[in-house]
C-alpha cells in the first residue's frame, strides 16, 4: 500500500513550519463560553459609558456670558518688524506705569490677519522678568478687543506664534509611530485622535457646563478606555482581558482618591482652580475637579500595564501550553514586578516635573520638608501620585489573574494537547522566531547524523 511504502521509505514526517497541528498559524477560535462571559461582564460598562456621555453632555447649552468675560477677544496673527528701547508712559499697553527712563521696548507689529490685516501697529511692553523678549522676525499672537481695528490700543500681544513648529513636531511623531508600528501604529494614532476628541468634545464642555467633574471623568475615561484599547489591539479575548483589568484598577483608583481626598481635607482650590472659578462666574466642585484629574491622569499608565501583562500571559502560555493557572500566574507576575517598578517611578517623576516650580517656591520659603509636604498644593500632588501608583501596583496581579484564567479557558487547548496560539497575535514575535530556529536546528542535526537526509514534508490533507 502506498501509505505503508511511504512509512517504510521515510518514517520521519516533518510538518511544514507553521502549518502543523502543534504550531499552526490558524489559531483555534476562543471558547464561546469565555467570549460570552467577557462580553456579559464588559457590555454593561460600555453601555453605561455611552449613556453617561449622553446624559452629561450639555446639549443645546453654552457657557454663560459671565463665564466668557476676559476670554472673548479674537486672536490676530502678526509679525514683529521693528523693536527698540523706549521710555514707559502711563498710557502703555499694559495700563501700568513701570517707571521713567528706557525700561520698555517699543515693537512695530505688522498684522497678518484680522480686520486690519496688512496694517502696522505699535506695542509698548515693559522690560520685566515675566515679559517675553520679542525680536524682529518673531511671529506673535495678539488679542483684538473688537473696538477700532486701526487703533494700536485695540490690540495686545499675548504670546508667540508656535503653530507651525508644533505641527512639524506632530508630523515627526506621527511618522515615527507609523514607521515602527505600521498598521498597529496607524490604529494607535486613530485611538489618540479619539482620545483628544473625547477630552475636548465631551469632558471639558460638560465640566464647564456645571456637571459633576468626577462623573464626567469616569464616563470620559470609560469611553477612552474602550475606544483606545479595542482600536489599537483589535477585538479579541486578549484585549477584553486588558480592558477588564483596566476597569477594575481604575475603579480602585477612584475609590482611593475619593477616600484620601476626604481624609486629608483636600479642597482642590489651588491658584489655577481659583482663577477658573472666578472666570466661570459660578461655583464648581474643586475637589471633584482634583479627583477627575487623578482618574484621567492614571488611565494612560494603567493601559500600558494591563496590556503588557495580558500579552505576557498569552506569550507564556504559547511557549508552554502545559502550564497550569498557578504556574502561569507566577511566571507572568515575575515579569510584572519589573514593569511596576519602572511605571511607578515614571508616574512619580511625571507629577514631580509638573509641580517643579511649586516645589522650588516652597523650598525658597525655608520651610521643612514635612511642612512643605502637608501644604494644600503639595499634598494634593502626593495623593495624586500615590493613589495612581497604588492602582498600577494592583493592576498587575489583578490583570495577570484574569488573563491566566481566560487563556486557560479557551476552547480546551490544553486538554487536547494543542500547542497553537489560543488567541491571534503577531506571528513574527519572539516565540515564533524561537520555534523556527528550533525546527531548523533539529533538521540540521538530522542531516548531519543521517548523511544528507532531507525531511519529507507532510502534505496537508484536503478537506
Image (spheres, rainbow, N blue to C red):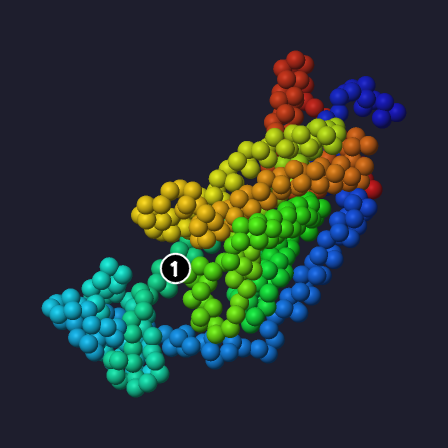
Measured from the top left, where is residue 2 in percent x and y? 85, 26
Tell me where residue 275 sits by quadrant. bottom left
Residue 396 in percent (x, y) is at: 62, 39
For the point 52% across and 54% down, which residue is it? 266
Percent across and percent down for residue 119 are: 25, 80
Please identify the residue farthest to the bottom as the structure is shown. Answer: 148
Say whether residue 230 is left or right of residue 158: right
Q: Residue at x 60, y 63 (%)?
A: 216
At 34% across and 80% down in the image, what residue appears? 145
Q: In the displayed structure, does residue 291 sit left or right of residue 406?
A: left
Query: Which is nearer the eye, 295 or 20?
Result: 295
The quadrant of the picture occupied by the N terminus is: top right
How many numbered marks are there? 1
Res 186 visible: no
From the image, tell me which residue sits under label 1.
Answer: 166
Q: For this view, does 358 lie left or right of residue 12? A: left
Amino acid at each position: 500500500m502506498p501509505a505503508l511504502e511511504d512509512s517504510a521509505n521515510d518514517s520521519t514526517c516533518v510538518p511544514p513550519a507553521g502549518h502543523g497541528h502543534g504550531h499552526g498559524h490558524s489559531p483555534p477560535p476562543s471558547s464561546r463560553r469565555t467570549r460570552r462571559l467577557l462580553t456579559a461582564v464588559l457590555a454593561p460598562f460600555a453601555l453605561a459609558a455611552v449613556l453617561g456621555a449622553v446624559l452629561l453632555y450639555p446639549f443645546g447649552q453654552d457657557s454663560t456670558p459671565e463665564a466668557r468675560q476676559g476670554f472673548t477677544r479674537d486672536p490676530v496673527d502678526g509679525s514683529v518688524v521693528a523693536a527698540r528701547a523706549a521710555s514707559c508712559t502711563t498710557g502703555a499697553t499694559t495700563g501700568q506705569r513701570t517707571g521713567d527712563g528706557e525700561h520698555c521696548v517699543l515693537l512695530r507689529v505688522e498684522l497678518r490677519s484680522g480686520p486690519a490685516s496688512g496694517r502696522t501697529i505699535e506695542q509698548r511692553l515693559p522690560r520685566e522678568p515675566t515679559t517675553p523678549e520679542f525680536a524682529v522676525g518673531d511671529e506673535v499672537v495678539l488679542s483684538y478687543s473688537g473696538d477700532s481695528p486701526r487703533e494700536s490700543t485695540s490690540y495686545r500681544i499675548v504670546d508667540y506664534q508656535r503653530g507651525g513648529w508644533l505641527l512639524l513636531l506632530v508630523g515627526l511623531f506621527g511618522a515615527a509611530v507609523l514607521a515602527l508600528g505600521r498598521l498597529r501604529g496607524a490604529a494607535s494614532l486613530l485611538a489618540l485622535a479619539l482620545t483628544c476628541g473625547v477630552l475636548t468634545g465631551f469632558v471639558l464642555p460638560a465640566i464647564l457646563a456645571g456637571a459633576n467633574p468626577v462623573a464626567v471623568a469616569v464616563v470620559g475615561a470609560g469611553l477612552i478606555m474602550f475606544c483606545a484599547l479595542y482600536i489599537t489591539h483589535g477585538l479579541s479575548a486578549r484585549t477584553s482581558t486588558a480592558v477588564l483589568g483596566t476597569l477594575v484598577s481604575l475603579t480602585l483608583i477612584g475609590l482611593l482618591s475619593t477616600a484620601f481626598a476626604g481624609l486629608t481635607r483636600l479642597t482642590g482650590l489651588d491658584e489655577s482652580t481659583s482663577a477658573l472659578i472666578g472666570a466661570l462666574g459660578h461655583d464648581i466642585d474643586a475637589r471633584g475637579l482634583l479627583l477627575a484629574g487623578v482618574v484621567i491622569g492614571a488611565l494612560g499608565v494603567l493601559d500600558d500595564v494591563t496590556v503588557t501583562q495580558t500579552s505576557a500571559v498569552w506569550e507564556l502560555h504559547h511557549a508552554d501550553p502545559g502550564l497550569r493557572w498557578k504556574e502561569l500566574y507566577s511566571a507572568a507576575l515575575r515579569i510584572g514586578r519589573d514593569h511596576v517598578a519602572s511605571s511607578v517611578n515614571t508616574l512619580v517623576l511625571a507629577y514631580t516635573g509638573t509641580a517643579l516650580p511649586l516645589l522650588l517656591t516652597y523650598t525658597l520659603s525655608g520651610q521643612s520638608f514635612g511642612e512643605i509636604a502637608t501644604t494644600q498644593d503639595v499634598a494634593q500632588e502626593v495623593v495624586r501620585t500615590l493613589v495612581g501608583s497604588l492602582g498600577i501596583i494592583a493592576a498587575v496581579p489583578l490583570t495577570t489573574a484574569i488573563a491566566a484564567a481566560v487563556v486557560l479557558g479557551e476552547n480546551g487547548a490544553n486538554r487536547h494537547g494543542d500547542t497553537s496560539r489560543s488567541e491571534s497575535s503577531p506571528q513574527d514575535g519572539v516565540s515564533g522566531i524561537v520555534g523556527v530556529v528550533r525546527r531548523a536546528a533539529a533538521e540540521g542535526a538530522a542531516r548531519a547524523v543521517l548523511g544528507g537526509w532531507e525531511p519529507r514534508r507532510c502534505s496537508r490533507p484536503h478537506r
